[in-house]
Image (cartoon, rainbow, N blue to C red):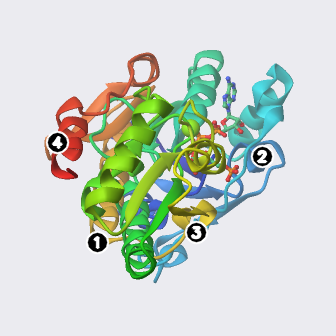
Amino acid sequence: MSKVSKIAVLTSGGDAPGMNPCIRAVVRTAMYNNVKMVGVRQGYKGLIEDDIYDMDSRSVSNILNLGGTILKTARCAEFRTPEGMETAYNNLKKRGVDALVVIGGDGTFTGALRFSKQYPDMAIMGVPGTIDNDLFGSDFTLGFDTATNTVVDALDKIRDTADAHDRLFFIEVMGRDAGCIALRAGISCGAEAIMLPEKDTAIADLIASVKSNQAKKSSSIVIVAEGDKNGGAYDVAQKVKAEVKSYDVKVTILGHLQRGGSPSAFDRVLGSRLGFSAVNALIQGETQKMVGLRGNKIELTKIEQALTHQFKLEDDLMLMSDILSI
Ligand SMILES: Nc1ncnc2c1ncn2[C@@H]1O[C@H](COP(=O)(O)OP(=O)(O)O)[C@@H](O)[C@H]1O
Ligand SMILES: O=P(O)(O)OC[C@H]1O[C@](O)(COP(=O)(O)O)[C@@H](O)[C@@H]1O
Ligand SMILES: [Mg+2]
């Protein structure tokens, strides 16, 4: 006997490729188990504004290949208030919803946990959906693989023109507080330097390495994660430019193109697995947890733990990327 009768699903925070395959899996797994489904548009904003609609298997046809999220997403300040949460709860209760699947990042989970502590009869299950890959409890988050491949594609193109002109490029990639995209994309493209929020890079050291590279290579690519403490790519480029006048320096900010596009096969499979497991966990009576992929196995982590434990960037990958770019 299922512990839930009607599940609501929403996407919240920054969109991420793979959210649609996940929504599809949530809806179809619920249908298979005779659990009713509703979709909430625009995350917590839709909960408060009662923008909620019935879903069935056909509501999620032909969306596996779509980027973005068919449910739309938002950042919602009102959900941070007790009044906002109460309105959201009442809107769910009047429809007979007793469980909620939230697909999003750390902010989304923080909100979901507060909500569930306030209203414990509403079971919640989190699915890690963010291109930043910055959540403890899952080796990979939805969208990270697609976003990294998008960055790699862009970096390969920039390398062509950088090499043709013997130029030095500073490329800024997303990652509010996390260097996962920067590190993986940097390794994939042989970046000469990668600046990460998790690692302090002294500008003097960067200048020395750029000068030494100029003597032996025709082009250089420096990746700057947006959360790097030296500022964005423009700031870093300006500081370096003053010291390497003979190098033609260019800056590219990849920006929001990193969040779009059709999900990779990896993100489609990951979204399907996480959505499927989220519903099964709710049916088994689990709540206040996040489904994640660890060592190619689906595992549940308490949301409290996912939020308090720091996701750690791999030291060995950082060292390896330095060595391989000599
Ligand atoms: N402390 C909080 N209390 C309640 N809701 C929160 C809290 N922190 C974040 N949220 C909700 O989660 C939404 C998404 O969070 P955000 O940090 O923007 O994205 P992400 O989930 O991708 O990290 C916020 O707009 C807000 O509605
Ligand atoms: O689209 P916005 O609101 O400007 O947010 C940009 C931020 O969203 C992200 O793309 C994803 O972050 P979240 O998943 O935490 O929302 C960050 O890398 C970036 O800093
Ligand atoms: Mg976040």
> Crowdedness of circle 3 by 10 Å Cα count: few (<14), some, many (20+)?
few
Q: Is residue 46 above or below residue 137?
A: below
| Amino acid tagged 1 | Ala
Q: Residue at x 69, y 62 (%)?
A: 53
Q: Secondary structure at mark 4?
A: helix
Disc 2 from disc 1: Cα separation: 30 Å
| Amino acid tagged 2 | Lys
Q: Is residue 26 above or below residue 154?
A: above
Judging by the rendered image, the residue that carries numbered circle 1 is: 265
> Which is closer to the viewer, label 2 or label 1?
1
> Which is closer to the viewer, label 3 or label 2?
3
x, y percentage for residue 37? 54, 57
Quadrant assignment, res 72: bottom right
| Amino acid tagged 4 | Met
Judging by the rendered image, the residue that carries numbered circle 2 is: 45
Label 1 near ligand 2 (CB < 8 Å): no
Quadrant assignment, res 73: bottom right
Judging by the rendered image, the residue that carries numbered circle 3 is: 257
* Sequence-first disc among 2 and 1: 2
Mark 1 near mark 4, Cβ–Cβ under 8 Å?
no
